[in-house]
Image: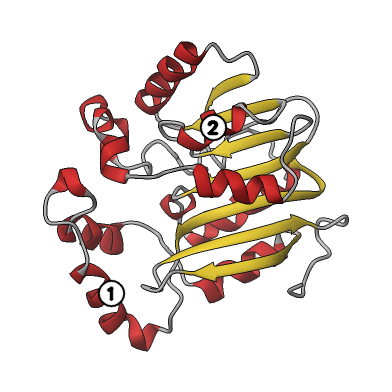
Amino acid sequence: MKLSRYPPNWWLDEVAHAGSEHLDAAYIAGYDRKAGTDPTADVEVLRNLGLDRTSTLVDLGAGTGGLALAAARICRRVIAVDVSPAMLATLRAKAERMHLLNFELVQGGFLTYKHQGEPADFVYSRNALHHLPDFWKAIALHRVAAILRPDGVLYLRDLVFAFEPAEAGSVIEAWLAGAAVQPEEGWTRSELEQHVREEHSTYDWLLEPMLLHAGFAIREASHSASRTYSAYTCIKMAAQAGARSRS
């Protein structure tokens, strides 16, 4: 994608779309407890896909760094990317305590990160792509493909709606019914309602063609019982623009 001015005036401001809470140091101080995310299972998935001591991994939307820090114990190079200075400050403090020598921090996002060095073997992203409207998701996924070597892996986890529009009322209400009661325990009903209203989670039947169009083959797609969370294992095809059918 060649632009005479980068970024042009019409380019999306990712910081403005990150959600004000993700820029708030006070909110971030309790984020790990609230999110309750254990990277163990995702690290195991990546290892089964070939992540090892020779690998370079880019974590887009790294947040407070659970996955990136865990992966740094396994692979050659980890680049943790996030648009939030407050998130990166928290992550930097953790990384310094661990004395990591193979760990890099970059302020940026799907639309602004500029990869340096050899192409990445893996790109990981969890609960970050939904901050972008669909127009920008498509551009973001093309940029992700450009980061990766041929046959490189994108492991994408996010809030994705695996249902038809006619089912939205019943599925969303069932999802909200299982929300946490207190904010410190997890995501509350009001927070999830705000997500549905104001953020940009898309349908699986819209996201999957975007992945294919960006040059990925979808090796595996799985959806949660609530039909609101999905995980995609995608492989960059040798000819980036050539993938049009699901593997």
Label placed on residue 117: none
Quadrant in which residue 3 is drawn: top right
Q: Residue at x 75, y 45 (%)?
A: 50
20 relative position to 121: left or right: left
**Judging from the image, what secondary structure is the residue with disc 2 in?**
helix
Q: Residue at x 60, y 68 (%)?
A: 221
Q: Residue at x 42, y 71 (%)?
A: 161
Q: Residues within 10 Å of mark 2 (few under 14, many from 20)?
A: some
Q: Residue furthest bottom?
A: 166
Q: Residue at x 29, y 58 (%)?
A: 195
Q: Amino acid at mark 2?
A: Ala
Mark closer to the chain start, 1 or 2: 2
- Residue 107: x %, y % from top left: 50, 26
Residue 62 visible in the shown view: no
- Marks 1,2: beta carbons within 8 A: no
- Residue 145: x %, y % from top left: 72, 49
User: Is 216 in front, or is 135?
Assistant: 216
Quadrant in which residue 208 is drawn: bottom right
Q: Disc 1 designates what residue? A: 172
Q: Residues within 10 Å of mark 1 (few under 14, many from 20)?
A: some
Q: Amino acid at mark 1?
A: Ile
Residue 158 visible in the shown view: yes
- Residue 137: x %, y % from top left: 55, 55
- Residue 228: x %, y % from top left: 39, 68
Label placed on residue 70: 2
Instruction: Report the Cα–Cα distance between label 1 and label 2.
Output: 33 Å
